[in-house]
Image (cartoon, rainbow, N blue to C red):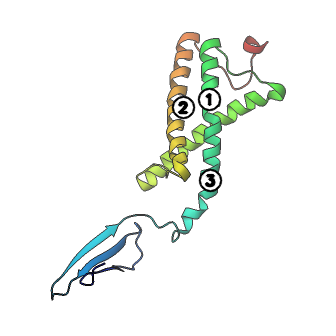
Amino acid sequence: MEASKMLLLSPACTLPSPLHHKSFHYTSYKRSKFHTSLKISSMAKDESSDGAAGGNGLAEKIAIAGGLVSTPIIGWSLYTLKTTGCGLPPGPGGSIGALEGVSYLVTLGIVGWSLYTKTKTGSGLPNGPFGLLGAVEGLSFLSLLAIIVVFGLQFLQQGSIPGPLPSDQCFG
């Protein structure tokens, strides 16, 4: 910097705030007797000072992994339901059918968590690492919409939707 100017950033407020305000004063000093002061405020959440932020790390990672696995399985399930009138086959030892059921529960869990967070904070889930939690949240809402549409069409065409257990009608 020039010898005639100096840049100082100093904390303006150190009081804790629920919105985690961080304020800094920008002051430019010149060799004259006048100086200019500009307050710069930030509402960025300080992850290191919030004890609850670290507690959701594991839950966020589990939701990301579960959402990334469950979304394509639900897509496969809905496609199979629409084209054959039945859900996925049980698979060896019932593993595919179980994975299908768990995928529906994971999607409903993510949507429920998102809605709960929305009512408490006014915004949905945080973006998470690399924005994956936000993406999983959006995919879960899209999956829920697809579930409602396909189940509704199935009900209108067949008069019912298939139950959670394999039936003789589909896999007999």
Residue for point 52% across, 68% down: 50
Residue behind mark 2: 143
Q: 115 or 10: which is nearer to us?
A: 10
Residue for point 55% across, 53% down: 129
Mark 2: which amino acid? Ser
Where is residue 36? Give x, y as percent: 19, 78
In the image, is 64 to the left or to the right of 167?
left
Mark 3: which amino acid? Ala
Q: Is residue 19 above or below residue 135?
A: below
Q: 148 or 24: which is nearer to us?
A: 24
Where is residue 81? Give x, y as percent: 63, 18
CA gap between label 3 and label 2 equals 20 Å
Sequence-wise, which precedes: disc 1 or disc 3?
Answer: 3
Where is residue 113? Give x, y as percent: 54, 47
Q: Can residue 161 be spotted in the picture?
A: no
Helix, strand or loop status at disc 3: helix
- Marks 2 and 1: in contact by CB < 8 Å? yes
As drawn, which residue projects farthest toward the right?
93
Residue for point 28% across, 76% down: 26
Residue behind mark 3: 59
CA gap between label 1 and label 3 equals 21 Å
Q: Is residue 96 above or below residue 139?
A: above
Residue behind mark 1: 74
Helix, strand or loop status at disc 2: helix
Q: Residues within 10 Å of mark 2 (few under 14, many from 20)?
A: many
Sequence-wise, which precedes: disc 3 or disc 2?
Answer: 3
- Marks 2 and 3: in contact by CB < 8 Å? no
